[in-house]
């Protein structure tokens, strides 16, 4: 502080000295008041500056925290870049795996083509086998016919051989008798006349001719037997060949069935894999960075490139697809992190701009404060020069003895005022020093802000860990690579979908081929059954032939049994005829009852369809009734013919029996006559024997004819029995149809009642709505909704949550033409709600509480309904997050209160609008040169005091 200048008051009068001292006192008072005011303003400014410094410190701490976050984000970006590179490598590997899958798919297509060719070959072989089987069946039928003919011929030939043997025996006996007679009559030859010798010679020649004819017939029959045996041998050889061929075909069919089963198992495995691949959903949710960081920490270390390549080469298509889905999820997470980073950078830029504007405002305030300080310094310098002049005046002038006391008082007061001024000056110096310190701190804060801005710019333009110069170019490159990878992935997906569609087509074709193979197998099994049936029929025919032979041998009792069977058939036919007539009368009565009732009733389309079905059934019943009548008529005619044939056969058998008896009696008589008669009676005996031989041959031919007729009658009886069984089955059908007709009649009555009610209601509606009803869009919507309600199925209950809410899903309506009906309808019923139309607000005042998982299912944002375990897990996660947020808020509030108690933070009750507005201070000029508000008020107060003192 500069020393005060003393004024020389020597040579001055007391009045002048008093005036000077008075004026100086006034000036000192004014200076003191102004200094006090300026001191107060400086104190207030100091407080405000302290507040601002605290705010700046808090802002700087926030910026440092954000810089740390940016560093962590940059580290995350580096990790993301590394992950992108690993994803690139994985995608390259996936491409190689996809190429290998494509190669496998091509190989599978080639295999399928080969299988199709094999199936075609198998189909051709099966067709050939069918043709062979048809030819074999035809040959078997022809062989069976031939065998039947050969057996008949054999039976006839055997009978003829027996007859010929008998004739030979008789001829041998007769020749012996003739030789005896000739030997006995040799002695009497002289007595025999020439006529007898000629007759004997003629008889011998005749017998020799007959013997030659019989020998020729025997040779012919033997040749026929040989030929028949050869035919039988050929047929047996052909049958063995056919059996071997059939065994080979069976083996081929077994092999083909095994191949088909193996291929079906492979196809089932492939379809199961396809279903698993279809069920796998492509989901990549955006996660916040803290969850992503936790997942990164929990992730295991990535394997090396060689191990990943080996695993990818060894993996299947499903594992590769899962890996591709995981890579897509990672790509989506990286995209979300990039967007989050960009948002953070934009927010930081906005905050930096806000802080820059605040710094500009502070600089303006600082400039105004500097101007005020300079003005105050100038004023203080001017005031320092005034006391020096007063001291010089005191030295020059001399004091008078009269006014010594006043001068002493004035000098004491001046010294007091000077001391006060010195104190105020020192205080001002201290305030200026504090202001300089504050300015230094502000400069430091500015330097820190500049350093932070430079660090931000360096962060923006700093090289990344991968060695790139510009981060933006790196991000653009990453985005381009990601877009390229997405495009490649979409292309691969489209190719995979094409391959899936091709594979599905091949699977469908293979299913068709397998179905055809199964049909062919069924046909082959049917043919096998037919072959077995034909073999059994052949065996049965052989047995029947033997049985018929036995019957022919037995004779009469079998005929009686057949007559009894015919009588039973007649009685059963009469009973069936009576039942058919009764059913016909019932049907006619039902038709007569239905016709007048149906004529005046308007039938609905559904009832009309049911009536049409009933009418069809009735027409079928009438047709069956007519067929049964025709069959009965034909059976009656056949029974009549059979009766006639049986009577004829009986008469023939009786006549044959009488002839046999007569022949036996005649043979006995003739033997007696031969023993008693002489040689003259030999001609008669021989003639009678020839007559007996002729009668025996006629008897054998009649027996063969009767055998054939008996076989025909047995076949006709079998056919009649089969028809009887068919008629009985038809009667059962008629009875069932009668029961169904009664049920349909009862249903028709109920439908008629319902139709009457609906017709009445429809007439009332039509009368109420009028003719413009059909043009009304609301009516059309009602009709559409009714149709949709008729066509839709019943809703299915999917699940129930903890609150008791029931969730239902209604299946898709395929008949609807609306877009929203292309997916199933899902809805929820509250615990107190029994139907969907029941209002839930009237049940209770509580609002419906539906879990988020079920809400997503209702909105078709997820396909499968959630489980209780999933809901409980999500609730636990939400509770943990809430608990963390609550703890974080409590910690933040605690730290804030501690800072307020320490004075580091000021608790202001003003609103945000007043806080963010431009600050206005009383000790700061609003305009340059106007002065502060406190200075103006202080100057006005000082002038008022001076005026009052003058008065």
Image: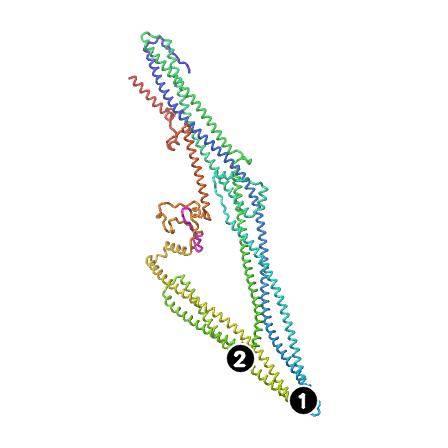
Give the residue pinned by disc 2.
650
Mark 2 residue element: helix
Mark 2, Cα crowd under 10 Å, few <14 / some 14-19 / many 20+, is some
Rendering coords of residue 466 (x, y %):
55, 36
Task: Look at the image and tell me in which quarter the C terminus lies.
Answer: top left
Residue range corresponding to the magenta coloring? 802-822
Q: Is residue 947 magenta?
A: no
State the residue in front, 330 or 931: 330
Q: Quadrant of residue 359?
A: top left
In space, the residues marked 2 and 1 are separated at their CA atoms by: 45 Å
Residue 395 bears which disc, if any? none
Q: Quadrant of residue 652?
A: bottom right
Give the label, 2 or 1, closer to the camera: 2
Q: Look at the numbered disc 1 and give the secondary structure of its residue.
A: helix
Left or right: where does residue 950 sit relative to residue 373?
A: left
Relative depth, front residue between 260 and 789: 260
4 is higher (above) or lower (below) than 716: above
> Which residue, as the protein is rendered here, is positioned at the far left?
951
Q: 85 or 382, which lies in front?
A: 85
Query: Which circle's residue, 2 or 1, is located before the other in the chain?
Result: 1
Residue lying at the far top of the rendered structure: 401
The residue identified by callout 1 is 199
């Amino acid at each position: 502080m500069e020393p005060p200048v003393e004024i020389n008051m020597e040579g001055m009068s007391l009045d002048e000295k008093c005036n000077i001292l008075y004026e100086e006192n006034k000036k000192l008072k004014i200076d003191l008041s102004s200094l006090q005011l300026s001191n107060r303003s400086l104190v207030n400014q100091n407080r405000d500056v302290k507040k601002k410094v605290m705010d700046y410190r808090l802002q700087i701490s926030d910026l440092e925290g954000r810089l740390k976050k940016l560093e962590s984000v940059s580290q995350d970006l580096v990790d993301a870049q590394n992950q992108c590179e690993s994803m690139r490598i994985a995608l390259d590997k996936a491409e190689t795996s996809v190429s290998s899958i494509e190669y496998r798919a091509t190989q599978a297509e080639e295999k399928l083509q080969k299988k199709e060719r094999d199936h075609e070959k198998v189909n051709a072989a099966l067709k050939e086998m069918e043709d062979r089987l048809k030819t074999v069946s035809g040959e078997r039928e022809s062989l069976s016919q031939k065998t039947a003919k050969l057996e008949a011929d054999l039976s006839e030939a055997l009978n003829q051989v027996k007859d010929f043997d008998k004739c030979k025996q008789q001829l041998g006996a007769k020749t012996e008798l003739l030789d005896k007679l000739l030997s006995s009559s040799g002695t009497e030859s002289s007595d025999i006349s020439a006529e007898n010798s000629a007759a004997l010679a003629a008889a011998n020649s005749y017998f020799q001719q007959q013997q030659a004819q019989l020998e020729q017939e025997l040779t012919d029959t033997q040749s026929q037997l040989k030929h028949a045996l050869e035919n039988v041998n050929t047929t047996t050889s052909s049958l063995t060949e056919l059996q071997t061929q059939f065994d080979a075909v069976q083996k081929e069919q077994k092999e083909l069935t095994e191949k088909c089963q193996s291929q079906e198992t492979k196809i089932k495995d492939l379809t199961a894999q396809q279903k698993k691949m279809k069920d796998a959903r492509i989901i990549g949710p955006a996660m916040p960075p803290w969850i992503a960081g936790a997942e990164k920490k929990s992730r295991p270390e990535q394997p090396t490139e060689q191990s990943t390549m080996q695993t990818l080469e060894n993996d299947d298509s499903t594992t590769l697809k899962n890996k591709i889905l995981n890579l897509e999820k990672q790509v989506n997470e990286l995209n979300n992190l990039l967007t989050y980073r960009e948002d953070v950078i934009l927010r930081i830029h906005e905050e930096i701009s806000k802080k820059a504007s605040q710094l500009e405002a502070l600089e303006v305030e600082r400039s105004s404060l500097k101007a005020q300080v300079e003005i105050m310094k100038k004023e203080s310098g001017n005031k320092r020069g005034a006391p020096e002049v007063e001291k010089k005046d005191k030295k020059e002038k001399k004091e008078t003895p009269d006014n010594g006391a006043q001068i002493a008082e004035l000098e004491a007061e001046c010294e007091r005022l000077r001391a006060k001024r010195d104190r105020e000056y020192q205080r001002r110096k201290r305030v200026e020093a504090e202001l300089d310190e504050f300015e230094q701190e502000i400069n430091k804060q500015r330097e820190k802000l500049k350093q932070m801005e430079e660090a931000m710019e360096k962060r923006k333009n700093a090289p990344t860990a991968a060695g790139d110069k510009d981060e933006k170019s790196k991000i653009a490159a990453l985005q381009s690579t990601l877009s390229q990878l997405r495009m490649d992935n979409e292309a691969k997906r489209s190719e995979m979908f094409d391959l899936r569609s091709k594979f599905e087509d091949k699977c469908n074709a293979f299913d068709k081929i397998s179905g055809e193979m199964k049909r062919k197998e069924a046909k082959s099994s049917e043919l096998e059954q037919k072959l077995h049936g034909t073999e059994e029929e052949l065996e049965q025919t052989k047995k029947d032939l033997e049985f018929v032979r036995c019957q022919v041998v037995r004779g009469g009792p079998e005929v009686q049994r057949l007559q009894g069977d015919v009588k039973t058939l007649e009685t059963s036919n009469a009973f069936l005829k009576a039942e058919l007539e009764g059913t016909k009368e019932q049907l006619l009565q039902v038709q007569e009852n239905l016709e007048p009732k149906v004529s005046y009733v308007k039938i609905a389309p559904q009832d009309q369809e049911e009536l049409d079905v009933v009418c069809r059934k009735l027409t079928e019943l009438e047709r069956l009734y007519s067929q049964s009548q025709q069959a009965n008529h034909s059976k009656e005619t056949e029974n009549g013919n059979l009766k006639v044939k049986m009577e004829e056969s009986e008469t023939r058998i009786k006549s044959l029996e009488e002839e046999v008896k007569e022949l036996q009696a005649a043979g006995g008589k003739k033997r007696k006559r031969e023993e008693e008669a002489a040689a003259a009676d030999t001609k008669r005996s021989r003639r009678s024997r020839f007559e007996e031989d002729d009668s025996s041959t006629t008897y054998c031919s009649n027996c063969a004819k009767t055998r054939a007729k008996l076989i025909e009658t047995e076949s006709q009886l079998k056919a009649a029995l089969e028809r009887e069984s068919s008629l009985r089955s038809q009667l059962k059908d008629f009875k069932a149809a009668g029961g169904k007709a009664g049920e349909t009649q009862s249903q028709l009555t109920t439908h008629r009642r319902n139709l009457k009610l609906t017709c009445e209601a429809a007439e009332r509606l039509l009368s109420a709505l009028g003719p413009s009803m059909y043009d009304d869009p609301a009516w059309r919507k009602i009709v559409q909704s009714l149709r949709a309600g008729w066509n839709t199925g019943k809703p299915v209950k999917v699940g129930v949550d903890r609150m008791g809410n029931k969730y239902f899903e209604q299946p898709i309506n395929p008949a609807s033409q609306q877009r929203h009906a292309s997916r199933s309808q899902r809805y929820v019923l509250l615990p107190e709600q029994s139907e969907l139309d029941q209002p839930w607000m009237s049940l209770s005042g509580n609002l419906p509480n539906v879990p988020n998982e079920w809400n997503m299912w209702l909105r078709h944002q997820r396909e499968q309904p959630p489980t209780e375990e999933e809901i409980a897990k999500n609730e636990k996660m939400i509770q943990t997050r809430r608990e963390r947020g609550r703890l974080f808020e409590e910690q933040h509030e605690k730290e804030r209160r501690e800072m307020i108690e320490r004075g580091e933070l000021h608790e202001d009750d003003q609103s945000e609008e007043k806080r963010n507005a431009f600050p206005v201070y009383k000790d700061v000029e609003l305009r340059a040169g106007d002065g502060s508000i406190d200075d103006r008020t202080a100057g006005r107060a000082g002038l008022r005091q001076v005026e009052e003192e003058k008065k």
